Amino acid sequence: MKIFLKILFFLIIIISNYGQKVFAAENNSLLKQDWSFKSFYGKFDRASLQRGYQVYTEVCASCHSMKYLSYRNLAEEGGPEFSEAEAKNIASQFEVIDGPNSDGEMFTRAAKLSDKFVKPYSNDQEAKNANGGAYPPDMSVLVKARKGGPDYIYSVLLGYEDPPADIKLDEGVYFNKYMYGNKIKMASPLSDGIVEYADGTKATQKQMAKDVVTFLTWAAEPHLESRHRVGFKVIIYLLVLTILVYFSMKRIWSRIETKI
């Protein structure tokens, strides 16, 4: 019995930590953060999520869209959890094209909770032309789309530096030691104090990078907390079931006499 329980416990530890160990092994050169959402029981930091949305809105949203998010998501459980009134106020600051009206014409109106996040550009070509030919990727699932996930995005945001003497960069191209190929057409988006946090937190580059990456991780995995809760319950259920099955089998076999 003791050996069986030890094996079972060992398997549970392997399952819960395997992903993190593989991630660490493959990305040991990236900058690391103690992300609150990374552990098996991980949860999002609500204050960080709200600050991250502020960074996205004031810094990133002028170029990068988040086409899979609606304003109502900002008030849903498991996310930034703004109040419904706050989410409505956020939405009302943006305009969307709607229609046609009774005259058959399109019109603009203030965004509602049911609307998707307003895009900065009307089409991909406009986005490329405004950014020197480079298309600014949608950020809805960016964390999931990049190897290294949140650590990679965090590292890129803080990885800008002067290029080595043997590397020549074209105009409008910047050196980033964590970017694939070390070249990026986006200038460093963060600088100390560029955002004035509503909660009074000091807006350093590292703090803003951490907050916006937390927000992007939630955007890519909005049900992460519920999955963690379900996973924990499943493991407890399996443990209890295994113990019950063991004792049931032990009781059944106890009635059978062993022949020598």
Image (spheres, rainbow, N blue to C red):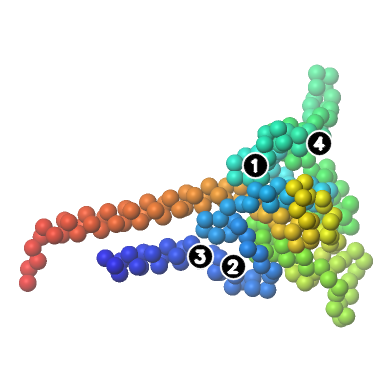
Q: How far, Cα to Cα, is label 2 from label 4? A: 39 Å
For the residues carrying marks 1 and 4, which lies nearer the camera in this image? Answer: 1
Identity, as a three-letter code, of the amino acid under mark 2: Phe
For the residues carrying marks 3 and 2, which lies nearer the camera in this image? Answer: 3
Q: Is residue 31 above or below residue 217?
A: below
**Label 4 SS:** loop
Q: Position of residue 165 (x, y in %)?
A: 88, 80
Q: Position of residue 239 (x, y in %)?
A: 35, 56
Query: On the image, numbered disc 3 is attached to which residue?
Result: 17
Query: On the image, numbered disc 2 is attached to which residue?
Result: 23
Residue at figure coordinates x 11%, y 57% from the top left = 255
Q: Position of residue 118 (x, y in %)?
A: 78, 40
First of labels 2, 1 by sequence position: 2
Q: Looking at this view, is 148 or 1 the one in front? A: 1
Residue at figure coordinates x 45%, y 53% from the top left = 232
Q: How far, Cα to Cα, is label 3 from label 2? A: 10 Å
**Label 3 SS:** helix
Identity, as a three-letter code, of the amino acid under mark 3: Asn
**Label 1 SS:** loop
First of labels 4, 3 by sequence position: 3
Query: On the image, numbered disc 4 is attached to which residue?
Result: 93
Identity, as a three-letter code, of the amino acid under mark 4: Gln
Residue 142 in view of the camera: no
